[in-house]
Image (cartoon, rainbow, N blue to C red):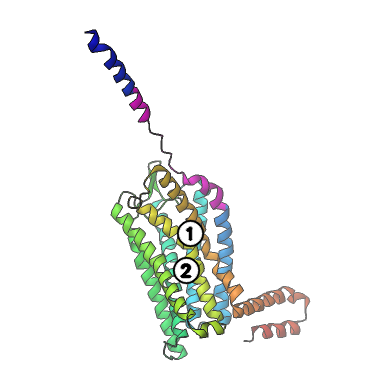
Amino acid sequence: MANYTSAPEDDYDVLIEDDLSNSEIEPCVPYDPKILSGQLVPSLYTTVFIVGLLDNILVVFILVKYKGLKQAENICFLNLALSNLGFLLTLPFWAYAASHGEGFDDPLCKILLMLFSIGLYSEAFFNVLLTVQRYKEFFHVRRRFSACRTVAGSIFMSALVWVTAALVTLPELVFYKPQMESQKYKCFFTGLHFLPDDETFWKHFLTLKMNILGFLLPLFAFVYCYVRMRKTLQFRERNYGLFKLVFTIMAVFLLMWGPYNITLFLSAFNEHVSLHGCASSYNLNKSIQITRIIATTHCFINPLLYVFLDKAFRKHLSRLCCLCSDAASQPTEEPAQGTSGEEYYLSP
């Protein structure tokens, strides 16, 4: 009997104790996006909204008042500014939500989602349209149209782009599910508000749609057109200011939205790329928030590019500044001098 009971029980107890100590799992702490949003988003988005609203309205005014809308590229630039303005209108709401730690109800959520998505897709499509127009102009592909038909065609293409952007946004509106907080559905800028977490298929579908239409399509148009144009000696010898402006606008758009699209893809398909661990999920969620915050600040950059790369825009801007200074000093000047100065600056 003594040979049967002593040693095996002691060994068995040691083995069980060792297994329990090795099987302890460290708790997985999820990433809390509200911390960074509360610290950074309110001041940043308020600044971007004010600056972007002023400079995009200035672009619209100069295009309509001075440069005119008789050229196809000016109509596209006007629509780009309108896309940015629509996108900008969502920033004060996200800033308010981040500062107060609260979300919005469903009707307002869908309106913000619509402005966000249509602004993003329409800008991507207008960038593609501008790039293709410059490509056709460079290789003399386009036919000669009268000014009226060119304007009519540009207006038709612009309307088509807006309709396409609205149709592309429909899946987000149909399958959108706000987050639950305090027994109420709310939307927050911190999360992927257009991706239903419990629908894996639609999560993959909506992510691929954004990656393809919002990033890969502009990237392909940019690379294809720029590489083909760069190979020609004519492009190297001549100074094409408009070509530089168009391709710089596209390059900035891709650089700012590219990291967000990549992290969004990795997050949606984390099971397929072996990034489903606790640390990987934490880093991905943090990267998504940071890259998204950076990407949404793009809507005030285009007017700055016009100032640096468009000589005609700088000339019209200086003319407008002179008009404003003349209007401010008009009460102290003689009426005849003020009138003549105004006529000079308004002359084409």
Residue 167, quarter of the rendered image:
bottom left
- Judging by the rendered image, the residue that carries numbered circle 2 is 83
> In this orientation, which residue lies closer to the viewer: 12 or 329?
12
Task: State the CA–CA distance, disc 1 to disc 2.
Answer: 12 Å
Q: Does residue 172 appear in the picture of this structure?
A: no
For label 2, count other residues whose C-alpha is less than 10 Å away and answer few (under 14), some (14-19) or many (20+). Answer: many
Residue at the (39%, 73%) spot, across then down? 161
Left or right of 345 on screen, residue 123: left
Secondary element at image label 1: loop
Q: Quadrant of residue 260?
A: bottom left
**Label 1 is placed on what type of residue?**
Thr
Would you call the spot at circle 1 few (<14 residues within 10 Å), some (14-19), or many (20 or more)? some
Quarter of the picture holding the C terminus: bottom right
Asked whether 194 falls inside the magenta stretch, the response is no
Residue 181 spot, x, y in % from top left: 40, 43
Q: Amino acid at mark 2?
A: Ser
| Image quadrant where one finds the N terminus | top left
Question: Regarding mark 2 in the picture, which secondary structure is present there?
Answer: helix
Instruction: State the predominant SS element of the stretch in magenta.
Output: helix
Asked if residue 66 lies left or right of residue 341, the reply is left
Residue behind mark 1: 90
Q: Which residues are magenta?
A: 17-42
Is residue 296 visible in the rendered image? The answer is yes
